Each structure stands twice: as C-alpha cells, then as structure tokens.
Amino acid sequence: MNALERAVADGGAIAAVAPMLGTQMLALLPIALENKLPLITISGTAAITQKNNPYIFRFFPDDATVTNAQVRFALEEKHAKKPAVIYQTDAYGQSGRAAIDNWLKQSGITPVYEDALDPNVKDMAPTLQKARAAGADSLLLHLHGASTALILKEAAAESLNLPIVAGSGLSQPATTALLEPAEIGGVCAETGASPESEETPAMHDFVVKYRAEFNLTPDSFALNQYDATMMVLNAVAHGAKTPEDVRQVLSTETYPGLAMTYKSDGMGNMAHSAVIICFDGKTRVPYVAKHYDLPPATH
C-alpha cells in the first residue's frame, strides 16, 4: 500500500503492475479506485474482480476458470468419483476450494474429504492418511508451490497411487525443481499456459529470450505478466497518455498475447483459457494434455 501511494504521489503514472498475492491485491483496491489508476495483476484470487472496481485487470485465469479445467479433467479423463480436496488456508486456498466445490457440485459430486493446510505445514502424511481413510479415489490440490512439492513427495514415498490434479503451483519450474521426475510421474496440474512446453514457435522464442535475460525458465505467471505489460505498452504506443486512456483500452479492446487472447468480461477478468499439464516421470518438463476455454459469462 505504501509503495503504490508513493508511486501515485510522485505523479505521472498511468498504470501499475500490481502484485500477484491475493491479500496484497485486496489491500490495493481502494487506492486504485481513489486515484483512478489501472492495476494489472496475475493474481488468481477470485474476489479481487468482484468488488465493482473498474481499475483492476487480471491477466491470469481466475480460480473459477482454472479449477473448471482441473475438475473437468479429473472427472472426464481420470474418472474421479470420490475426490479429496486439499487447499491452503489463505485467500488463494479459500478461493480455489470454493471454486472446486462449486464445479464438483454442478457434476453431482461431493468431496469425500477436505483439508485446509497452513502454508507453514511441513508434514503431509496425516492429510494423505485421512484422505485414504475417507476412501478418496483422487486428489485435487489448490496449494502454493512449496506445499505442492511437499505433498507430492509424501504421496510418492507412500506409493499413494491415486490420480492427482494439482493447482498452478506445480506449473512453476521452481516447484518441480524440488521434486524428482519419478515423484511427479502421472501427476497433472491446471495453469494458464505452459511456456516451457514450447507449444508454438512464439512460445519457444519467448523461453529462449527469457532464459538468456534471467537465467531462469519462465512459468505461466511470467508469461501472463509479460502479456499484461505488453498490452499496456501497446496501448501507450497507440496513443494512450492518461490512466483513463489505459483503462478504456483494457476495458474494451482485445489483445492477442502469447499465452492466449485477452478480453475483459466487464469485471476486469481478461483471461478465459486454461491448460492441463502432465508429467511423464522421466523429465521435469510437462506436456500439455488438454486445452480448455471457458466463456467469460460462466465464471
């Protein structure tokens, strides 16, 4: 909040690249509204675009979009009937849990077990044991990267042998680096895009340039953030000079990014596509198993 207020006080800002953490974004909403400054974010927390704030633009698929893909893949491709839902206790986890439960309910399914984990929890054995005891035939995870790695490592050590469809935390190379390829063999995850899978020549070029610049492999968050920033810069290149100019462009125009095509749904949700990535057990680089597009009006 202090950082954004300083930026506004300095004058001249026509937009701001905002944080990805939902709790931070929720704190920034009133400042953006008061100062009429557009914020672009890749936060997935659903609530940030549910506050009737015309200055918030989310360029990562919200929890309703990615969990739709997650649940559909688990039910249709993994034939899950008695899933356990494991989620984080923070705003990200609560938002994801609500969306997962909603999509399951629409399919007539109630989770056999649900557990909320504090991000500081390190021992995942009790949670997995309770899920197994409840008769779970699959796991749906909505956890941050570190918690995702811990629970997958424990699942592999216990030979859990249940289909697992994780959240976008597993799409991050920083997360898969914590795991051996065999520990994630057969595991899948939802995410906005998978740049390291290099599905297109443009995606390949982005990955090459990103690695050269940062000596890191980009994840979906980096790619969607790039697309968001480029849409703002494209607006400036075509004449946008004020915050209202930028807001108008973000609110009304369509932008063909690398990850997907972006278009506001009227609430500031710009991204309406998701992919499911899976791991073959031989490498930490995933392959894209399925694409999903969700009409903006349904999420």
Image (spheres, grey):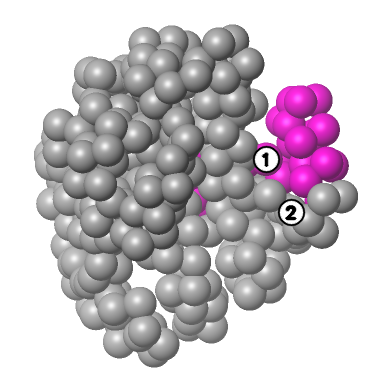
Q: Which residue: 37% across, 33% down?
A: 38
Please indicate whether residue 298 sits to the left or right of residue 291 in the image.
left
Q: Which span of residues is magenta-colored?
A: 187-211
Which is more toward the observer, 8 or 149? 8
Magenta segment includes 203: yes
Kindly tell me whether residue 160 is visible in this rendering.
Answer: no
Quarter-of-image position of residue 296 = top left
- Total labels drawn: 2
For the question of whether residue 62 can be seen, the reply is yes
Q: Are marks 2 and 1 in contact (CB under 8 Å)?
A: yes
Question: Quarter-wise, where is residue 216 in the image?
Answer: bottom right
Quadrant containing the N terminus is bottom left
Q: Amino acid at mark 2?
A: Thr
At label 1, the amino acid type is: Pro
The residue tagged 1 is 195
Q: Residues within 10 Å of mark 1 (few under 14, many from 20)?
A: many
Q: Which residue is mark 2?
A: 217
Q: Nearer the viewer, residue 8 or 37?
A: 8
Residue at x 74%, y 53% (from the top left corner): 217
Query: Any mark on residue 74, and which?
Result: none
